[in-house]
Amino acid sequence: MKKVLIISYFFPPVNTMASKRYGTMCKYFEENGYIPYVLTTKYDVTMRRNIMLDCELPINKKNIIRIGSVRHNTEAVGLGWIMMSGLLNDWKYYSRTIEIGVMGWCNKVKSEIDLESLRDIDVIIGTFPQMVNLSVALYLSRKLRVPFIAEVRDLISDYSETPLGFKHAFLIDRIMERNILQRAAAIITVTSGYKNILKERYPPKDIGVIYNGWDGEPLHCLEEREIQTEKYLYYAGSFYLHRLKSFRLLVKCLKKINNYTTEKIKFFIRSIGPVELDAKAINIIHQEEMEDYVYVLPAAVEDVVRKEQEKAYINVVLSSLDSEDKALMTTVPGKIYELLRQNPPVLAIVFGHSDIAKVLDYTNKGIASVNEKEIVDFIVDKNKKYMGNYKINFFSRRTQTERLCKFMDQLLVE
């Protein structure tokens, strides 16, 4: 059995999207010839709002190395980084790679890690985000003299969206990205669109696509969908500025349906914030006079969300209305894969050339559109033919772990 070391700042029991990827895939490594080890942080109960500590550990505790705290690593950051971060903040520049709250973790790992206990590791995977995961992976790769794979789950230097009032520190992020990715033995991405962008930028690198996915038993039958007496659309997740525009478009479409047809369809949103964008979403509801049909509800535990998703008439995915934004057009939110397993069809508010659309088309699970008529027609009637197909099984975590292990096998042979 070969051994793989995964560097992930967040890991179960912390329940975040960043911890769920390997928090699930680690269960399937051994059946594919790899024993997984994880280097991560310690956790505490005073984490950020709405973050739970309810994820089950996928591997034995003895294979998990915990250094530093999820919350408290700033004190280990060098003075130079602190000064640079202060200047960026003063000049209103936002960087995805200079994260003072977590950057000190690399120094803590260097001072506390027992390298001798890791001498038989065969390959290392570092995941972005956070950038510090890649820095730690590069450091350990050099010390242990084993190859490291850079996993890019969000594009590093390509996102244009920033906090209000800030500009993107593009040049800094591109330099930081190149410094790491050029030294990686290979790169993994999570969508074909990401691969195309990075392949053009790093042509010599071997780049593989390992999708996020759902966990559970394979689909053996496609059940008939039970239409609920009270039809409602359902969205669970965060609001971002680009998602608010998609949200407004969908609310307008619902307004047309409820005003001009006999249908009275509601829309429930389980938002995990941020609070200021929740307020903007509620303001949109008021502006469109849809208070009786569209509701922003507080966050709920995962079991509640799953039950509400399963009972929905249609599950909703909000993305960007900017067709020129390559980063967002090639992003597939992790929740989409979980929705593939649910009975209701999926409506994604995004352009039809996006990677989200490719997943929905491939699995016949729904549509991606920004056209009002298409959205209205889908909600009123045309959603019924999108039951899904057996290609949904391709996106199981087990299948994707098998593909990842084959990718690592090939890398080690080379």
Image (tube, rainbow, N blue to C red):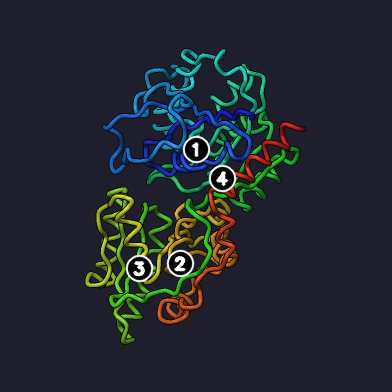
Rounded to the nearest whole Å, what is the CA distance between mark 3 and mark 2? 10 Å
Location of residue 171 in the rendering, given as x and y in whole percent from the top left corner: 57, 36
Q: Is residue 394 left or right of residue 292?
A: right
Circle nearer the N terminus (3, 1): 1
| Residue labelled with disc 3 | 312
Q: Amino acid at mark 4?
A: Asp
Instruction: Indicate which disc residue 158 carries.
Output: 4
Figure quadrant of residue 199: top right
Circle nearer the N terminus (4, 2): 4
Figure quadrant of the N terminus: top right
Rounded to the nearest whole Å, what is the CA distance between mark 4 and mark 3? 34 Å
Residue depicted at 50% across the width and 69% down the height: 222
Rounded to the nearest whole Å, what is the CA distance between mark 1 and mark 2? 27 Å
Circle 1 residues within 10 Å: few <14, some 14–19, many ≥20: many
Q: Secondary structure at mark 1?
A: loop
Residue depicted at 37% across the width and 46% down the height: 164
Circle nearer the N terminus (4, 3): 4
Circle 3 residues within 10 Å: few <14, some 14–19, many ≥20: many
Q: Are marks 4 and 3 in contact (CB under 8 Å)?
A: no
| Residue labelled with disc 2 | 346
Circle nearer the N terminus (4, 1): 1
Q: Is residue 41 visible?
A: yes
Q: Amino acid at mark 3?
A: Ala
Residue depicted at 26% across the width and 72% down the height: 293
Q: Amino acid at mark 1?
A: Pro
